[in-house]
Image (cartoon, grey):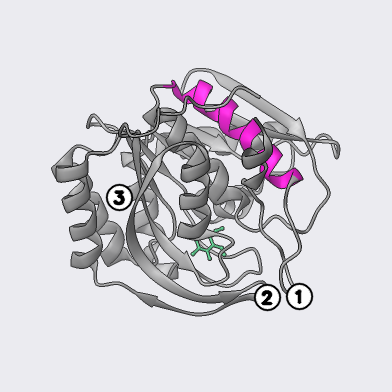
Amino acid sequence: MKLLPLTPDGQTPVRVLTIAGTDSGGGAGIQADTRTMALCGVHACVAVAAVTVQNSMGVSDFHEIPPAIVAGQVRVVATDIGVGAVKTGMLASTAIIEAVADVCGEVGIGRDGQIPLVVDPVAASMHGDPLLHEEALDAVRHTLIPLATVVTPNLDEVRLITGIDVTDDASARLAAEALHKLGPQWAIVKGGHLRSSEHSTDLLFDGDKFLEFTAPRIGTTNDHGGGDTLAAAIACALANGYSVPEAVEFAKDWTYRCLAAAYDLGAGHGPVSPLWRLHSD
Ligand code: PXL
């Protein structure tokens, strides 16, 4: 695959900021984001929004970081280090979402600013454990998603956000339209085309045209962190100057390779892995 350019040793690489939750099991959340960013050749900056108590079997608890501390991390990174793109993941509460939206506006992150924003509207773990308070869904819809350069929900998140159950091509398009009406520049419906068991197709929509991105479907239960990896890889490509469709094409291919390299870990779901990149030259 065509990889992102690597900065020569000793020169400052592109920076990407993730605003998200940690995963003590190291598979998803901030750990998936920073692994992806490092192996995409990008310097990862981090604003921790929540700490999850988690292993391969699920999330048993989480602790929210005070909203002013989340926003403070974003502010000091953006104003000193400078970032080429930002990604949000688990934000847990309305108060954190509002603080993140405010600081993004302040430092030029998001669709009205200079810095592209990838919003992964994380609501639950793959085990069904909640990562977002139910009362925060309105803030996801009306405060967070309107800021997005691109929003990347999975099918469960699409259902929660839009009320649409995606079962086929037509409902995937309806869902993409409903998401786009909330105000992001682009909306992705991941795996929205259930037309083939051999392929996974993501649908991208900008209010005008639908674009499709397809990869072979990999039958594995070791797919923890797959959504985080896709969104983080999109952010890395955007920070390198790719357009949104180019970034999604890159990220789809990247994530397919990470799924192919996923490994067993603990008794539950293992993580997708970008470590294949270390063997690729
Ligand atoms: O994959 C979504 C996700 C994001 N962030 C955190 C998570 C998970 C899934 O478990 O734990 C912290």
Distance CA(mark 2)–CA(mark 1) = 7 Å
Q: Are marks 3 and 1 in contact (CB under 8 Å)?
A: no
SS assignment at label 1:
loop
At numbered mark 3, what does the secondary structure look like: helix, strand or loop?
Answer: helix
Quadrant of residue 8 in the image? top left
Q: Residues within 10 Å of mark 3 (few under 14, many from 20)?
A: many
Residue identified by numbered label 2: 57
Which residue position holds label 3?
Answer: 143
Label 2 crowd bin: few (<14), some (14–19), many (20+), radius 10 Å: some
Q: Which residue is pictured at 62% across the width and 35% down the height?
A: 254
Q: Which residues are magenta?
A: 242-260
- Marked residue nearer the N-terminal end (2 or 1): 2
* Residue 238 screen position, x and y as percent: 41, 29
From this view, report whether residue 272 is shown above or below residue 215. below
Q: From the image, which quarter does the N terminus lie in? A: top right
Q: Give the residue at mark 1.
A: 267
When the figure is inspected, residue 200 is found, relative to residue 128, above or below; the finding is above
Residue located at (49% from left, 35% from top)? 234
Secondary structure under the numbered disc 2 in the rendered image: loop
Q: Is 109 on the left-hand or right-hand side of 250?
A: left
Question: Comparing marks 2 and 1, which lies closer to the viewer?
Answer: 1
Outermost top residue: 209
User: Compared to 176, does 93 lie above or below?
Assistant: below
